[in-house]
């Protein structure tokens, strides 16, 4: 994994903590939350304040995420909003933390100038002992204060100020005035500069969790469903009818299609569909080369495609399916028929513009892990797990590709792969052949999804 770390593909964008003041604030917050401290004078933290170095020191990778349900956090700076969330147990946690920081940025900036802010993402449940407990999760509330309790003290001061203003003898209560002065020294002027964090609550209906081997929960659809990447047996008694194992590809394809959660890449507007599909084909060639023991160190895109032409007859069906699709997209081939049980099916899709888009793209990465670019962007934990199983040849190629093609422009790459443009509004043509987009809208690019 050292190659990933050195190239910035693992533990990238973490916030460095190396000043005695910040380390001291972190330790106060850590003691407040966990009763523990670190002996390190230098370490790195993610968006939640979790440090991989401290996790190793404490021999507890969940020291800020007890039981993997109610994630605690330590904020030393608002710059943490751009950091990743390491080993997330819920796919929604990073988005909630980022939104909390952005919505309260001015207040957090003022608070973290003097102390660390410690808090917790309080879930509807405190432990997930069975799959059915996932359906008891309905909302996440963000609770936060400084390690020294500044916000709680500011609320107490506000109460004393109200009492001072409303009581007729408030001016003569020396004890009350002394308490207000003492509190104001610690909290600052709450009248001119009120320090109040916005109360934030988030619905938790659709999410991925790492519990039980990995589970996708879709509850905000007309027909809820659960997709299980681990053992399906414990999921027999759930309050939903649709429970699919990851290898039930036809059933999952039908679920995604019925709920309009995916679209063919060739249908997407504003992207170079053929280029995206060709890159997926290159990844398949790399897999084939790995199995054949071919060294791809320093291989260019031209080298990969030359290799594909040379060994065309031994390439898997997924490559040929995508190739037919590229030929059709470029007007050089007939309309291809790729059914849901075809190895290229999920490689040819991306999430539609729905509220579930990010989760669906994550699911597609799980269903088609050969696309290592989407795997890295949408499902890093699975990427890191699979990386350990790859040959040195594939590791070298993938790291070089991601460093060269993704790291230099992350936002641009995401927009090119997953961005959506508003559809063009045009009058329907009269007569003549059916336009390609209309044909796709009617039957999908390869006909209806096969029965389950």
Image (spheres, helix red, strand yellow):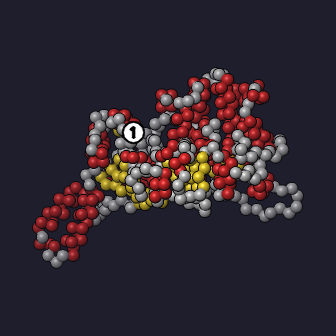
Q: State the residue at coordinates (33%, 36%).
A: 58
State the image quarter where residue 195 is shown: bottom left
Closest to the observer, 59 or 19: 59
Residue 293, position in %: x, y?
65, 22
Residue 18, position in %: x, y?
33, 36
Q: State the residue at coordinates (75%, 53%).
A: 448
Residue 373, position in %: x, y?
60, 38
Residue 356 at least partly seen? no
Q: Secondary structure at mark 1?
A: loop
Residue 293 at least partly seen? yes
The residue at the far right in this view is: 432
Q: Is residue 330 above or below residue 188?
A: above
Closest to the observer, 48 or 362: 362
Q: State the residue at coordinates (53%, 56%).
A: 238
The residue at the far bottom in this view is: 168
Residue 419, position in %: x, y?
62, 50
Closest to the observer, 161 or 135: 135
86 lies left or right of 314: left
Q: How many marks do you count on the picture? A: 1
Q: State the residue at coordinates (68%, 37%).
A: 279
Q: Is residue 206 above or below residue 2?
A: below
Q: Is residue 328 above or below residue 106?
A: above
State the image quarter where residue 150 is shown: bottom left
- Neighbours of disc 1 within 10 Å: few (<14), some (14-19), many (20+): some
Judging by the rendered image, the residue that carries numbered circle 1 is 61
190 lies left or right of 417: left
């Amino acid at each position: 994994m050292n190659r990933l770390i050195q190239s910035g593909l693992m533990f990238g964008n973490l916030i460095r903590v190396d000043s005695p003041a910040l380390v001291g604030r972190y330790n106060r917050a850590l003691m407040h939350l966990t009763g523990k401290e670190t002996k390190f004078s230098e370490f790195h933290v993610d968006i939640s304040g979790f440090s991989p170095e401290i996790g190793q020191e404490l021999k507890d990778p969940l020291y800020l995420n007890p039981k993997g349900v109610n994630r605690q956090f330590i904020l030393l700076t608002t710059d943490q909003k751009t950091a990743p969330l390491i080993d997330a147990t819920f796919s929604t946690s990073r988005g909630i933390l980022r939104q909390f920081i952005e919505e309260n940025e001015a207040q957090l900036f003022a608070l973290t100038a003097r102390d660390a802010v410690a808090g917790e993402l309080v879930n509807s449940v405190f432990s997930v002992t069975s799959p059915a407990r996932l359906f008891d999760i309905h909302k996440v509330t963000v609770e936060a204060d400084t390690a020294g309790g500044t916000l709680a003290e500011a609320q107490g001061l506000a109460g004393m100020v109200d009492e001072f203003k409303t009581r007729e003898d408030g001016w003569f209560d020396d004890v009350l005035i002394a308490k207000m002065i003492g509190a104001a020294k610690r909290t600052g002027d709450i009248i001119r500069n009120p320090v109040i964090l916005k109360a934030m609550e988030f619905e938790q209906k659709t999410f991925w969790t790492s519990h039980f081997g990995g589970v996708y929960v879709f509850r905000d659809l007309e027909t809820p469903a659960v997709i299980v990447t681990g053992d399906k047996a414990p999921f027999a008694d759930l309050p939903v009818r649709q429970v699919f194992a990851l290898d039930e590809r036809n059933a999952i394809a039908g679920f995604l299609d019925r709920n309009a959660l995916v679209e063919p890449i060739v249908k997407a507007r504003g992207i170079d569909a053929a280029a995206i599909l060709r890159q997926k084909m290159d990844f398949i060639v790399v897999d084939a080369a790995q199995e054949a023991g071919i060294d791809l160190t320093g291989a260019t895109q031209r080298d990969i495609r030359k290799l594909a032409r040379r060994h065309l007859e031994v390439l898997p069906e997924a490559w040929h399916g995508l190739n037919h699709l590229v030929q059709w997209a470029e007007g050089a081939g007939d309309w291809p028929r790729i059914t849901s049980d075809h190895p290229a099916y999920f490689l040819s899709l991306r999430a539609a513009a729905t509220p579930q888009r990010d989760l669906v793209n994550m699911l597609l990465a799980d269903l088609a892990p050969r696309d290592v670019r989407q795997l890295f962007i949408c499902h890093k934990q699975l990427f890191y797990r699979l990386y350990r199983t790859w040959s040195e040849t594939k590791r070298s190629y993938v790291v070089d590709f991601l460093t060269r093609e993704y790291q230099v422009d992350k936002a641009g790459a995401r927009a090119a792969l997953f961005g959506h443009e508003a559809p063009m509004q045009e009058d329907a043509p009269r007569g003549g052949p059916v336009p390609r987009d209309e044909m796709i809208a009617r039957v999908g690019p390869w006909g209806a999804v096969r029965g389950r």
